[in-house]
Every structure is written in structure tokens, then in C-alpha cells.
Image: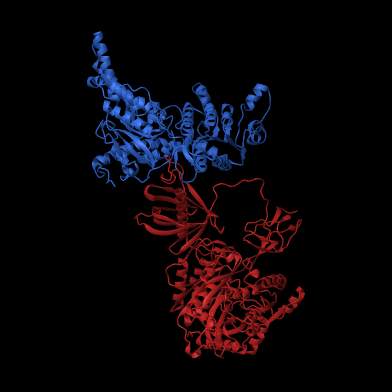
Chain colours: A red, B blue
Amino acid sequence: MNPAPLPSYTSVLVANRGEIARRVIRTARELGLGTVAVYSDADRDAAHVRDADAAVRLGPAPAGASYLDVDRILAAARASGAQAVHPGYGFLSERADVARAVVDAGLVWIGPPADAIAAMGDKVAAKAEARAAGVPVLPEAVLDGDDPTGWREAAEPVGYPLLVKAAAGGGGRGMRLVTRPEDLPEAVAAARREAQAAFGDGTVFAERFVRSGRHVEIQVVADRHGAVVHLGERDCSVQRRHQKIVEEAPSPAVTPDLRRRLGSAAVELARRIGYEGVGTVELLLEGTGDDARFWFLEMNTRLQVEHPVTEAVWRVDLVRLQLAVAAGEPLGFDQDDLAAQGHAVEARIYAEDPTRDWLPSTGALLRWRPGPTPARWDSGVEEGDEVSPHYDPMLAKAIAHAGTREEAAARLARALDELEVHGVRTNRDLLTAVLREPSFLAGEATTAFLDDATHLRASGPDGATTARHAVAATLAGVLDRRGEDALSGFAPPGWRNVAGDAPHTTWHDPNGATEPTTVRYRLEARGGFRAVVEPSGVELHGRVAGTHRTGPTRHLELEVHDGDDAVGVATRLRCTCTTDPATGATWVSSHGATTAWQEAPRFTEHGAAGAGGGPLAPVPGRVVRVATQVGDHVEAGQTLVVLEAMKVEHRIAAAEPGTVVAVLVAEGDTVEAHQLLVRLEEGAP
Amino acid sequence: MRGAPPTTIDTGSAEFAERRAGMQTLLDDVLAAQAVLAEGGGAKYVDRHRQRGKLLVRERVELLLDRDTPFLELSPLAGWGTDDPVGGGLVVGIGQIEGVECLVSANDPTVRGGTSSPTTIAKTLRAQEVARVNRLPLVNLTESGGADLPRQADIFVPGGAAFRNLTRLSAEGVPTVTLVFGSSTAGGAYVPGMSDHTVFVQGGAKVFLGGPPLVKMAIDEDADEETLGGAEMHARRSGLADALAVDEHDALRLGRRLVARLHWRKAGPGPSEPADPPLLDPDELLGVASPDVRVPFEVREILWRVLDGSRFEEFKPLYGTQLVCGWGSICGFPVGVLANNGILFSEESQKGAQFIQLCNRRDLPLVFVQNITGFMVGTRYEQGGIIKHGSMLINAVSNSTVPHLTLMVGASYGAGNYGMSGRAYDPRFVFSWPNHRIAVMGPRQLAGVLSIVQRQAAERAGRPYDEEADAAMRTLVETQIEGESTALFATGRLWDDGIIDPRDTRTVLGLTLSAAHSAPVQGTSSFGVFRM
């Protein structure tokens, strides 16, 4: 299945970052090719740079000045002697002009021909092609001009709910769901801004939204010699904000017959546009099995994020196929040679907080340790890396492949549980909850799945585990502090010759979702401890059987008895606790569960006169719109500022009615997290 | 490497279990006495204090200290057995603030309104002494109703020294910080007044020489407390407050910042030896000593459970064997140890005097482990010069300038108390085990001596001796002396700095050695003339 390439090139520049850059570099190395990474200033020490044989700086952190700068990338190829350019996904991967420029520069473009990209790049034109290839399409309308009334008229025949999508887009960028005509103008404006920022093209269109459809996509591979095959479908219905987070192959909704129909349609379209390399035809599927209906959504003329599930079940290396096709190699197999085996599920681990509206989380990745359960980890990061606010917050993908869907899902959930990730918040608990949700396991998930199953967003370890982690975090803090006592480190923790109240540590839930947790503790001789966790009232006692520190992480071996343990059976609890020295945020992992904590400060700082009230930037980002001015009377919930961080827009609204006293930022400003944006005087005018 | 110490204690034996149980009983009495301290002035006053939004004294202290660091409370049971509240309404101890060992002295305003009893004065003066000799920055947490007026006669004159001591500390370069949480009026106003640094709690601190009634009486002026001595007034107008705290937590935060900014450096050399734990379990210390001081025990069994790695280099092990002398270290601090294994003879006295001189030449702090019934008496020993030799030991103890730590692990009778650096010989600290007994001599001996003296007087006068009365007298005296020589009685009179759980001995000695190293550790070669 994997042809041995005879490359017309010996060195590949990967014009991308993160996990996909590392993924491409891995296969290129296996084939004996030289690898060149490119990087922005924010990625100077990133994992993909370390992986490559050579690395070339592109420019400052903003993608427009680095990863999206074609001239710099071509110059980097020239400077490094690379003869081929692999675009990865996102960034420049679906820009026909870039494909052309690469070829014009005498380099090999590892992707489809520019014409094929162009044919599929404009989503409206792409639908025409699909229609011509006999693939059904959804009603749609281009939303051009600057007249909101015109947009509404144009959208009328499409009907509501509809999706506003970037013509040049993909991956959910520049996409907005609109349920009422009056919301259309703001959605169009926002989608345009996002599309412009992400793809350099602000064109958007409206498309009928099928609420309970499935997102199913067909992987196609074509060589330069006329061979086109498909590698079945992937089901990517589990999405948050149109962003896929769990993908699998095959789809539980697709029967062999339906697979043949979907595959033939995709192959037909690829053939029609003269496709080469690997590509994906995205379809909307309604119903299941032989009664299902499907519509063409778009074709992604690149490698997909979720390609590993296809690789697992079809036993191919899609990057290897890309490299071979680009080198002019024939595929060397046809559709009949291909057979899928088993089931694969992928989950995308994002540095974001599902409980706080998917707020991106940045900072130092203090600990990153996948566990022992076998799974494929395609990771863009390594322990110690910095998760910056500049790019997509995806940290890694985990893929499990097994004989059955149930087994693959169970194994993946287990592997995700075991991941010790400290330093940033992730969607991991959401992912494991999805993988264990009965409706998902029954194969019933549609694109509405996550919107409907909102309870999954607050998923996390159970109360007993959380209480134990609170105690572990507290003990780790005590031991760290004792370790730092240069004067009387010999004395037992909190030693008193006259007994007083038990000391305590108060922890905030970093999500702010629940009331603070207070752990009252006492340490006794030989590592013995007693702790009461409030408000749950959980009582634990036991012994610190062993402890040591590596870097910012303290390892604890606890022997724990529950408060009502009459038999005297101790549970061995192996914990890792990491505290971010910069923020005091603490993460605790044990037995496949991770919790995050923020220690309450011992004292409140009372400075000079307070900085005044008003909304703070929730994340570092860039101001894309200031929607208020000094003197405005604003209502609660009224938008004051729009920030873009990690390619996602954040609407910053007034928490209370009030009067704007000062606007402290301007459009284009870069702001830090917790920076005051607008000073408000509370109360009605 | 040396092997395990040659202990003869069998922790599985009935004797060990009996000693341990006996000591535990005595310790329980101490713990019961200490348990009262947590109740402050009683539930009624504690509740009222809390309702005012105020922190209890121990809460203030806990917030002042670095988290999870040790706090060695001094004289917690001062006043025990007197009419004064136990503890004197004052929490005194050594603890760490921003990595600086400080002497903390905090009023408990729930105890008789935080007023000063004679015990409060004695404890305050002792606290200031500890701060001075060990050069520990002094932090006062002040909220006091002033003198307990009905007791003013016992307070007024000696109490004046407290203010003098504050400024003398300052003059010696020992920083003084006072955080005022509530009233600190009349004489009490000089506590902030004499301090290097002051923080006043807004709405809480009230500091004036004369309150509204006195002002009305004296000059017929109507004034309210805030105007006369509120925190804001002192922060903005009088300048008595250096910093204004918005609340009690804030005062403690500011106090911690002040201490951090002292840039305090300890003057002693600090620990220099490996601080590995003893090879024998310090937990066994509860069963090592005899609860009854009349039953002797091997003092090395204590040393092996206190010294780092149980390492003890004996000095003259074959000479004057009832005084065990030698070198070791505790929590990394090198020390010379003098420990009693019986009464003091001439040889023991001379050995001790020589050892003290040696340790002074080496700048080594001394640890005295007292279990002493006195110097030997009798014709042979008097003629052998026991007074001369005992004087040599007392001379050496008196003029030694290295820090002395005295640990009472049993009896402390007679001049043995002096020769082993008892309270009057200004050791830096004295701590007692619960079995400790202290008096001029054992109760039975004392009663017996009285009986003999009276019998002789009767004989000389030719009176018949009333044997019945003699027996009653002996019982009475014995009981009285017995009661006046207990560890609790002694600690109530500040003859020591506290009774400790024997198992905490290593920690207590480590903490006090560390405190002593806040000041320079310097021996001397200058002693009184040794009578040879």
C-alpha cells in the first residue's frame, strides 16, 4: 500500500508548525529526506523546530508576518536548500497562488495542483463542480457587498438556520451559525474579519444548516497517472463551535453500500478537477445506512488533522503517499487492493476550558506525560514547551485503533485519562466524557451532539478523587515550603509545642464553577497526616510514604485511609503535583485523573487607590474592535471590545450597567491577560 | 562508621512500658493545662471578640508566621498555680516571619480584656530578654487593656522595664515591630512609642495617654476615642503609626513585609555538621527517663536519641564518670554536652569545669542535661575539697559566654542546679520534661533535715520530742515541698521556658540553637580565679 518513493527531491521544507509539522518531518525522515522547519519568534524553541534537521526563522509571532508570508517561506527554502515544500494543513495549504509560486520557484509542491486547489478553494465554485460531478449540494448564497439588507435578501432563499462560512475557509474558521435574520449582519461582519485574518480573504457565503446531520468525509488519494482511490470515510460529527474534536473511521452510520456510494461520488469529483495527492471530500449525512441522504459541503485540498484514523484502519501512511505522489510516483494499487481493518478513534486535545466557553489556556506546559495505554500520540508539544496565544490551541491528537468501535473508544478514553498534562487547562475531561457517553457509544452523535449534551462540558473527576487531589495539592505545598525552610527545615511541618488550630489551605476551582475548597491538615510523625476537606466534609488520613521533586513537579506516594475506614485498609495513591511558579496554579494527577487548583492568596494586597472597575482581558490577544467610547452609558451584556486570541473572537461585555469613564485600548492593540480594557463607573446614569 | 549505640533499653520490656506510661500520665497533666490556653478568656469573651470581626490571638500569630514553619511557644503555662490567668494572657514564642526568626509577643484580649497581671509582666520581660540575648527581632501584636488595676501594686514598678527594654533593644540594633490591633493606652501607648516600626489597624487601634474620661477630668475637653488615638489619626496626624492597615489581616501582611525589609542577618555561624536523625528513635524518649526522679537512669540513652546520627564523642569517659561530657551536634549545630549520671563529686566538678573552658575556646554552645540531686556531702568529700571543686564548676558555668541550653530531665536539687547552669545562671533557654523536680533538696531529705534539727533543739533544751508531731510535720513538709517542686509549679513561676514532650527534645534544642545563632556565638578565656 505504501509505494517506495523515488523522490525528485531530497529535502523537504515544512511550511507549518505544531503537530502537523512534526508529523510530516517524521515520515520524511523515515524516507531519508532532509527536513527543514520554519518558525516564528514565538516558536523559536518549539518542538517542530527541534525535530527538523534545519530551521529558518520567518518573522514575528503573528501568522501574517511569519507562517502566512509566502515570500519568506520561499526565501527559507532557497536559503536552506530544500527542494520541496509541504504546507501541512491550515496556513498556506489551500492557497492556489502559493502552490503556483512554489512551483514557479522551481520547487516541488507537496499537494494538489494549483488549479485543483482553486477549483475547490472558492466554496461556491466548488459546489458547482460538485453538482456537475453528480454530488448533491445544499442551498446557498454568496453574501457580498457591504449592505446588510442585501445580505439578508440574498440569504432569504437559503432559509434559517444557516451557516455563514468563509469562502476560502476550513476548520471552522470564519464560520457562524445564524438562527434569525436579524443576527445575520453581525455574524457576517465577524465571519469576514475572522476569514480575513485566517485566510487573507474575507469572502463569505450562507449555507443551509442541517442541525442533526453528521459530518462525514471521504479520504481520496490520486496520483499523476490517473489513479484515484478513496480510503473510506471519517465521521467527525462531534464538534464544538464547528471545530471537530473527536473523529473516527469508519462512521457508525455508514454501511458498505453507502460507503461505495460516498466513495464513488468523492472519486468522481476528484477526477473531474484533476486532483493529485491526498484530499478530503466533506459531506453532510442525514440518516444512517442505505436510507441516508448526503450533500457536498466542501473539499479540503490538503492533509486533514484527523488523517490518522484513516491511516490506522487502512494501514497507510498518508504523508508518505503525499510525498510519493509529489515525486511523480504511481500509487501502485487500486481500490480493490484496499481493505479497512477495525476501528480507529481520534481525540484532539486543546488548551482550552470547556467550562468557560472554550477560553484558550496559555502558559508553560509544565508536565506532559502520556500514560502506558497503547495509543498513537501526534503531539505538537513536549513537556517544558510554552503554549502561546498566537496560534491554534490544539496541543496533540491521540488515536486508538482496535478491533471494534467500543474497544477503540474505551482504549482512547483510558489513554486520555492517563495523560498527565499540567500547566494549561485542556478539554481532556470533555473528550473522555464524550468517549464514554452512551449516545456516542450507540453511534448516534450528530453535529448537534455537543450542543445538546452540555452536561459533558463540566465533566471531571468525581468528588472522592477531587477531595484526594485537594489533599495531595495541600501536602505538596507543605512539603515544598518545608523544603525551602533554610532555618528550621529539621522541624516537622507546622511543629507546635502548644496545640493550636489545624492549619489550612484554601483552593479555588480555577473554573470558578464551585465554591472554594479548604483543606485543614495536620502532619504527624513519620509522614502521617490527617486532613478534612471542606465543604464536602471528606476526612482522609494516612501517610506520605515517599516524595521527591523533579523540576516543578512533586511526586507523592500516599497511603490513604478514608475517614470512616474501620478495617484499616490503606489505598496507595501515586500523585504528581505541579505548581506553576509564575501563577501559583497547581495541577494534580493520579490514576488517570487530573484536577486543577488555584491557591487562594493568604493576604489581600491593598495597594494605593484601586485601579477602578471594568472588564479585563480574559486572555492575551489583539483588539479587533472597540465598540464603545467615553461617556457611553452601557447596559449589562453590551459589547465593549472584541478581542481575537488564538484565532477565536472574544466579545468583552459590560458586567453591569454603567458609564464608560475611559477606553484604555485601541483597535490593533495587543493586550495581556487581566489587562483592564475599559474603565466603567457602575450604576445607571 | 560506628555501629548503633550500645543501648540497654528494651522497648518491649515491662520496665520501658511502665516508664513510658508514667511519663505519659505526667505529660497528660501538662497537655490538660495547655488545653485551657486555646479557650482564651472563655467562650463568652471569645465569642464577643469574634463578633467584633477580630482575630483570636493564636490566629493572629499563625497568620504572622511563615506557613508550616515551627513555632516554639515560651512559658505557655506561666502563672500556673498562681491567682493569675495561666499563660498571663500573652502568647510568646519564637517563629519565622519571612524567613527571619523572630520573638513574637502577642496579647490575648479575651483574657481579662488583655490586661497585664504580674505573670504578664514577668513573661513580657522574659520575652524581651530572649530577644535581647539571642538578637531576635521582636514583633509585638498589641491589644491590651493596660494594668489589671486591682493588681497595680505588683505591676506598676516592675512593669516599667518593659518600655525601657524596647528602646534598649532598638539601641542594640535588635529591631522592634509593633502591630496595634486594639487598645494600647496610657503606659501601653509606649509600646508602639518605643518601637522601631508600627502598624495600626484602622478602626481597631486606640492609642492615647488619657482616654475621654481622663481628658474630661484633666482639662475639661470633650473628645472621642478616634480623635484622641484612632489609627487614622496616628497615621495621618501624629505620625505614631508608620502604616495604616485596612484590617487585621492587612496589619499582619504589612508586619510581614516590614520584617522582610529588615534585611536581617544572623550573626552566629549557623549549622556546620550533618543533621542526620539519631540512629535510635526519638519517640522512645518517652520511656527512657524514670517518672520518679529517685530512680536513676542512664543519661546517654537520652543523648543517643537526640544527637545527630547518635554521634557522641566523650570527653574523659573514664574520669568523673557521673558527669557525662562530650561533643556532638543537634540539627547540624555543634554542641558540647554536660549530662548528669549521678551526683557531683570533686572529679565530676573538675571535669565539667575543664570541659566548659574547652568549649569556650572552641565557641561551642553547651547543652546541660540536668538530673542532679546535688554535690556529694560527707567528711571525706569535704576534706577532699568538694567545695573548692564545686566552686570551680560554678565559676566556669557563671563566666562561660557561649550559649547555654539547659534541659531538665529529672531532679534538680541543691547547688547541682547552679553547677549545671540552672535558671539563675542565665542559660539562653531552660526546658523541662514533665517528670522534672526542682528544690533546694528532695522533699524527704528536706523534711528529714528539719526533723533532725528540731530533735536536736529539743534535746539541747532538754524537752521531750513529740514523735507524733514530728511525723505530722514531716508529712506536711514533704507534701508541701513535693507540690512546690513539680515541673508545673516551676514553669508557673518561669523557672523554665516551658515543659516539653520528651519526644520533642531534639526539635526544641534545634530551634533554640538556631535562635541562639542569631547572636554571635563566642566563648571566653576569662573566668574567675579558680581555687585550686
Residue sitting at 48 percent across and 82 percent down? A316
* B301 in relation to A182, above or below: above
Horizontal relation, residue A478 to residue B316: left or right: right
Percent x, y of residue A420: 47, 64
The answer to which of A519 and B39 lies nearer the viewer is: A519
The answer to which of A379 and B484 lies nearer the viewer is: A379
* A534 in relation to B398, above or below: below
Percent x, y of residue B147: 53, 26
Q: Residue furthest top?
A: B461
Percent x, y of residue A531: 44, 51
Residue A162's image quarter? bottom right
The answer to whether residue B196 shows anywhere in this view is: yes
Q: Residue furthest left?
A: B380
* A115 in relation to B227, above or below: below
Percent x, y of residue A487: 45, 43
The answer to which of B455 and A273 lies nearer the viewer is: A273
Horizontal relation, residue A93 to residue A468: left or right: right
The answer to which of A99 and B453 lies nearer the viewer is: A99
Residue A143's image quarter? bottom right
Residue A468's image quarter? bottom left
The answer to whether residue B21 shows anywhere in this view is: no
The tally of labels here is 0
